Amino acid sequence: MKNYIFLYSILAVLVSCKDPVKVGDTSTEKTAITSALKKDKETTIANPYQDGESQKALFKALKKKTPLTNEQLLAALPQHIHGNQPIGEYALQAQFQEASGMYGSAQRSYTFWIEDGSGSKAIVRNFYDALKFKNQGPEGTEYVFAEHDGYQTIAFLQPNIKQNQISFIYNNRFKISLLGSAAADTLWSYIDFENLKKLNQYQ
């Protein structure tokens, strides 16, 4: 009889020691996971505008690229904007990694830009930063951030002077902009993507 009592006593001690350890381990594991998730969430909240790894790689790669020449940029300008031809002999110009053209007439003109974001220029970085911060302009103007045909675009609206501009990044390198009196969505429809394919050779 004493032997049975002794065995029961040992079993009771073993069970009472085992259960708290199991519960303790599970509780510690859950606490560690919760802590890690909380830390990750806090990091995200603390750095809402931090560059992603893919963007960091893009910016680094652009710095190593050789900017296009003025002649190469000029060759990529469109021959017309929605049927509107360049205005005058000096309508198309290029300098400092940027080519621009004025089209239409003095009464109704359009200005088209190609900016090369390679080398030391921070054109692409500045565009993506603008998408993150979504700042607004002076009173009477408005920035509109939207997606058009898979491209992230920034439109700058100036209703008081009846001028709007829409911009986007092409091939992760070139900032393309079009300025005119038409609505931003209409300006977007005037961009000749077939002509922009001339830039595809400069990846």
Image (cartoon, grey):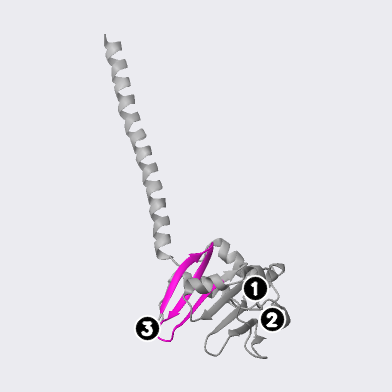
Q: Report, in whole angstroms, how far the alpha carbon at label 3 lies from the one at label 1.
A: 36 Å
Task: Identify residue for label 2.
Answer: 74
Query: Quarter-wise, where is residue 25 in the image?
Result: top left
**Left or right of 131, for residue 79:** right
Q: Residue at x 64, y 82 (%)?
A: 99
Marks 1 and 2: in contact by CB < 8 Å?
no
Q: Amino acid at mark 2?
A: Leu
Determine which of the numbered discs, if any, sits on residue 63 in the image: 1
First in sequence: mark 3 vs mark 2: 2
Q: Position of residue 8 (x, y in %)?
A: 29, 17
Is label 1 in a helix, a strand or a loop?
A: helix
Marks 2 and 1 sit apart, C-alpha to C-alpha, by: 22 Å
Q: Secondary structure at mark 3?
A: loop
- Give the mark, 3 or 1, whose residue is nearer the N terminus: 1
The three-letter code of the residue at mark 3 reads Gly
Q: Residue at x 43, y 86 (%)?
A: 161
